[in-house]
Amino acid sequence: PPSSFSTWYAASRAIGIFLSLPRGELRTEPILRHAFGQGKRVFCPRVMGDGWMEMFEVRSAEEALSLPRSKMRIPEPPADSPQADPAALDVLLVPAVALDLARRRCGHGAGFYDRYIERARAGTLARGGRCRTIGVGLTEQLEEAVPEEGHDERLDGVVFPGAEAMADDERPE
């Protein structure tokens, strides 16, 4: 049977996806290309200020892969691209330093994704929808237990090559 991730992804019309760094992160280019091939709207992150990011639309894999890099050497779409309402995303793929099978995530410590996930969840609940948050990582990023603090947002799922865990109470219909 298909996994929850593949079911959530297949049903999505708009996804948020990070553009992977050359090292230390799962390569997202194949997912990006597949999403465009399926006719999905694709949004990528741009840092807007201290601890604040937004997702902006990219129109093709080629555009996404040729975006200029920020001061932190992360590819970012221009701020004049169409901006996503966080509540309009069906799936948000989230990077991590470490993840565990309890769906806890350790990021780089700035809180960009925790704040964005909080906004997406608040907005989707208000309109009766759901933004599925999925941490994707390399096998070496899978930890036994990732520490969790009060401001950390637990993910709906985590996916690694050869392993995944989804929230039991969040299985799609």
Image (tube, helix red, strand yellow):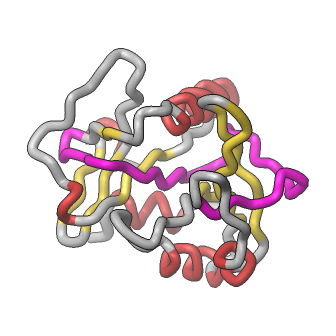
Report the front residue among 152 and 156.
152
Let me know if residue 5 appears in the view: yes
Q: Residue furthest top?
A: 150
Residue 18 placement (x, y as % from top left): 55, 59
Say which quarter of the image contains residue 164: bottom left
Specify the quadrant that holds the N terminus.
bottom left
Horizontal side of residue 162 vs 41, given as left or right: left
Q: Is residue 106 above or below residue 83?
A: above
| Residue appearing at x 23%, y 51% in the figure | 165
Let me know if residue 173 appears in the view: no
Residue 20 placement (x, y as % from top left): 49, 66
Magenta span: 74-102
| Residue appearing at x 84%, y 51% in the figure | 79
| Residue appearing at x 63%, y 84% in the figure | 37
| Residue appearing at x 58%, y 52% in the figure | 72
Report the front residue among 73 and 124.
73
Number of marks in the rendered image: 0
Horizontal side of residue 75 vs 93, given as left or right: right
Q: Residue furthest right?
A: 80
Horizontal side of residue 112 vs 171, given as left or right: right
Residue 99: in magenta span: yes
